[in-house]
Amino acid sequence: MDSLSQRFYSVIPAGGIGSRLWPLSRADAPKFLHDLTGAGVTLLRATWDRLAPIAGGERIMVVTGRAHRAAVEAQLPEIRDENIVLEADPRDSTVAICLAAAVLRRREPDVIVGSFAADHVIRGDRLFRSAVQQAIAAAEDGFITTIGIRPTEPAIGFGYIKAGESLGIDGAESAMRVDSFVEKPDAERARQYLDDGGYLWNAGMFIARADVLLDELRSNEPELHDTIVELAASWDDPAARGPAVDRLWPRLKKIAIDYSVAEPSAAKGRMAVIPGHFGWDDVGDFASLAKLNSNGRANDLAILGENARVLADASSGIVVSHSNRVVSLIGVKDIVVVDTPDALLVTTSENAQRVKGVVDALKISGRDDVL
């Protein structure tokens, strides 16, 4: 392990309920606690196993909700107690990532931190680690660095990164300056991005020296920065942490790190991107999950569930079964069936993004028992 890797600390934000994967993903069992690929491990465990070889499992921090502590510890029995950061309630990605960075900076002033979502699927661990090593080198050079994925199709479900000039950083030969971040496009613009060749998918991975990351946050969101730093000052003192959380947590602004750090940093020319050539998917909806589990073959039917009982004839799509019912499909294409003991979802791949609307409707109607 080189000296930069010895200073590196992985941060895994493990939050959100994955509302577009309802009723499989729930508040008490979000998608990072599920095996969505048939690999025999949850997405959280797979994320840990992917990161541990970089700097060791003792240098991985997980940020999650209080309600998920027991499940996280069950999935990651080797995690150190001081490396579980529990959120009083969700405050979006800026708080999750920057609080971890502030806590780690107090422990190690020269620490380099990298944030990697708990609920993404990555294939090609060697290529992933190579990209992270380059990102660490770019971070040491003073850049806030992200890893962008080479697009394989004109996807409309991801944000994009417009890459600019090569930066010529030792140890990060493929690092480029980020010209801008681009919101999720329509189909025509996504095709233009793919044809252009200068755009990458935004995978939400951020690697930076903790001091650089926090300085950028202070520049853009000074009140939020000061509250996070004050909270971090009490974090490793068990007697002081509780009162500090009670006093400060309600003051923490909800804002995604894309808006508080990444986009402003790119506008100042301080953001770098490493192209990632590994397989990546954020498993954002059931259409994505179907494709992931059918190896991209449109005419296949993906079946998930340890004891799924599915009969199918001339059908494609995905069935997720967590009940004892027999699910029979005849002559249906691109179907999505999610069968759980207390809720049933039936839709199509084309409408998979609309599942979040069902969750919103359930919240409004007060049916929290199935959320």
Image (cartoon, grey):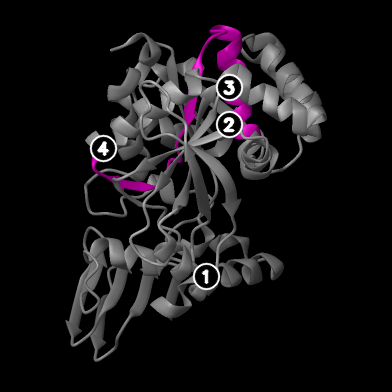
Label 3 sits on residue: 101
Disc 3 is placed on an element classified as helix
The quadrant in which the N terminus is found is: top left
Give the alpha-carbon distance from disc 2 to disc 3, as whole Å: 6 Å
Q: Is residue 364 left or right of residue 105?
A: right
Give the residue type that dot 2 points to. Ile
> Which amino acid type corresponds to the residue marked 1 in the rendered image?
Arg
Residue under circle 2?
A: 97
- What residue is drawn where x is 22% and y is 46%? 40
Is residue 12 visible in this depiction of the protein? yes
Q: Looking at the picture, does residue 347 appear above or below residue 166?
A: below
If the image is split into quadrants, where does the C terminus sit? bottom right
N-term-proximal mark, 1 vs 3: 3
The residue range painted magenta reads 95-124
> Tag 4 or tag 3, which sits nearer the N-term?
3
Residue at the spot of label 4:
127
Cα distance in 3D space between marks 4 and 2: 24 Å
Instruction: From the viewer's side, name the closer residue of 58 and 364.
Output: 58
Q: Assign a secondary structure to mark 1.
A: helix
Q: Nearer the viewer, residue 280 or 45?
A: 280
Q: Is residue 40 one of those drawn in magenta?
A: no
Q: Alpha carbon of mark 3 to alpha carbon of mark 4: how far?
A: 25 Å
Could you tell me residue 244's position as x and y percent? 75, 19
Label pair 2/3, CB-CB below 8 angstroms = yes
Which residue position is annotated with label 1?
Answer: 189
